[in-house]
Image (cartoon, rainbow, N blue to C red):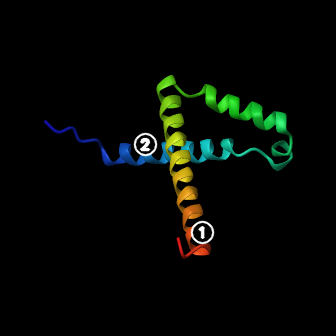
Amino acid sequence: MACYLDPKSVLNFKRIFGELNDLLISLKKLPEELVENEYICQAAELCEEAGFTPEELAAYEANWDWIRVEKTIREGTLAKGRYFFKNPSI
């Protein structure tokens, strides 16, 4: 059984949550004078981290681990290519 919403309700929902999304995005950006202070940047990162559940933090860390592995593999391959380019007789 399908559940259909009133088109006006859907439009209001999108308008309200679209505005909230813009507000949340603007709140994530610190003013330039605050970004220059290392302690304030660290405090902002801790506040953002506190808003995640343990599962979300684990997924976030897993994503960064994957990125680090890919970066390491790419750098190793590039270094190997540079070595063989400089020493073509090998």
Residue linked to disc 1: 82
Instruction: Determine the residue located farthest toward the left in the rendered image.
Output: 1
Q: Quadrant of the N terminus?
A: top left
Q: Residue at x 85, y 45 (%)?
A: 36
Q: Is residue 4 left or right of residue 69?
A: left
Q: Nearer the viewer, residue 51 or 64?
A: 64
Single out the mark in the foreground, 2 or 1: 1
What's under tag 2, amino acid-wise? Phe
Q: Nearer the viewer, residue 32 or 22?
A: 32
Residue 2: x and y in percent read 17, 39
What's under tag 1, amino acid-wise? Arg
Question: Which label is found at residue 13?
Answer: 2
Residue 72: x and y in percent read 56, 50
Q: Nearer the viewer, residue 79 or 55?
A: 79
- The answer for how far apart the CA atoms under marks 2 and 1 are is 55 Å
The image quadrant of residue 64 is: top right
Q: Is residue 73 above or below residue 23?
A: below
